[in-house]
């Protein structure tokens, strides 16, 4: 929604202001300039990045239409799942916990919170580190270091498409200049012709510079920043999982471990202490 609204505002204000000033919108329609700028940007993007990054960047643009998948409901589902899992470990021991996490799709604990079950990586993250706890071969410091490394690696992969798009945004003004220079070259070949024809070609050349700057700072760069923010939201979700697990490993009861995780939740998405307590007590009852 933000993506569509933002594009409408940018284009509406720029083009509307131009028309209000007496400009002819049809003069901005220069398909050849779009081909030069867009083709150069896409080609440079392909040269600079492996296919996997290009594919994820394309998927990231589609994800912007849906918005961040990590909302308050996701954190509430996470806390409910973690509370149930840690309660099983406390009451039934590690063997009982192993039975529950072996196949999350068949587990009632996960099945009751489909919003979390759909997040395959988050579910695998929970599984992997609870299995390490069950094995009993790692202390809390080794476990924390490994979790941090896992989160950092995943974040690096998630933020790669945003970085790639940001580099394209930096290059777009230059490609706009390339289009403008080519337009001037074309204009120079028409010197001596009708002034109207020369004026149209100069205008087309200037539109190339305009499009390069507008696409860079009005569209591609903001989209890159939005994709980076979504990657940060995902990393923060895993840090909350990490905090819950480490709280339990340190010997705290499940409800206290969940409170640790609540403190690691971003303020806008964090449930209040009373709301979370009521949620867990309701489940307990």
Image (cartoon, rainbow, N blue to C red):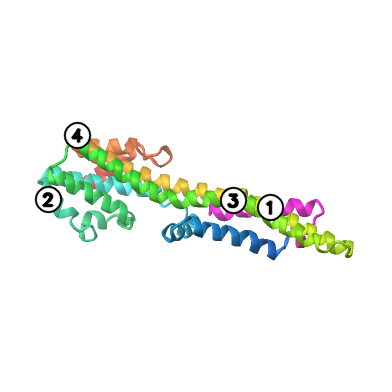
Measured as percent of width and height from the top left, residue 85 is found at 20, 47
Residue at numbered disc 4: 250
Whichever of labels 2 and 1 marks the residue nearer the N terminus, that label is 2
Using a 10 Å C-alpha cutoff, classify the residue at mark 3 as few (fewer than 14 neighbours), some (14 to 19) or many (20 or more): some
Identify whether 94 is placed above or below 250: below
Tell me the distance, in whole angstroms, between the alpha carbons under discs 3 and 1.
Answer: 10 Å
Foreground tag (3 vs 4): 3
Q: Is residue 101 visible?
A: yes
Return the disc, 3 or 2, that comes first in the chain's sequence. Answer: 2
Nearest to the observer: residue 279 or residue 13: 13
Which of label 3 and label 2 is nearer to you? Answer: 3
Q: Of the numbered discs in the image, which one, if any, rests on residue 157?
A: none
Nearer-N-terminus badge (3/4): 3
Q: Residues within 10 Å of mark 2 (few under 14, many from 20)?
A: some
Which corner quadrant of the image does residue 4 belong to? bottom right
Q: Which residue is mark 3?
A: 171
Task: Point out the tag, 1 or 4, that comes first from the N-terminus.
Answer: 1
């Amino acid at each position: 929604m933000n993506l569509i609204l933002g594009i409408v505002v940018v284009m509406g204000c720029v083009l509307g202001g131009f028309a209000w000033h007496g400009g002819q919108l049809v003069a901005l329609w220069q398909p050849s300039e779009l081909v030069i700028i867009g083709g150069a940007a896409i080609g440079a993007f392909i040269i600079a990045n492996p296919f996997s990054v290009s594919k994820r960047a394309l998927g990231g643009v589609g994800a912007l239409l849906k918005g961040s998948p990590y909302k308050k409901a996701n954190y509430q589902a996470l806390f409910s799942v973690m509370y149930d899992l840690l309660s099983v470990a406390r009451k039934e021991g590690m063997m009982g916990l192993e039975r529950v996490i072996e196949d999350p799709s068949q587990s009632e604990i996960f099945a009751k919170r489909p919003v979390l079950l759909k997040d395959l990586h988050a579910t695998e993250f929970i599984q992997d580190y609870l299995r390490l706890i069950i094995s009993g071969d790692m202390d809390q410091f080794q476990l924390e270091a490994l979790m941090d490394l896992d989160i950092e690696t995943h974040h690096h992969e998630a933020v790669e498409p945003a970085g790639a798009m940001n580099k394209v945004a930096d290059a777009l003004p230059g490609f706009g200049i390339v289009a403008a220079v080519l337009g001037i070259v074309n204009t120079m070949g028409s010197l001596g012709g009708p002034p109207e024809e020369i004026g149209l070609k100069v205008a087309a050349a200037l539109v190339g510079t305009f499009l390069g700057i507008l696409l860079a700072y009005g569209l591609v760069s903001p989209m890159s920043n939005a994709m980076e923010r979504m990657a940060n939201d995902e990393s923060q979700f895993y840090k909350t999982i990490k905090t819950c697990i480490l709280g339990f490993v340190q010997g705290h009861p499940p409800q206290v471990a969940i409170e640790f995780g609540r403190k690691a939740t971003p303020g806008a998405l964090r449930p209040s202490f009373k709301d979370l307590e009521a949620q867990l007590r309701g489940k307990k009852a």
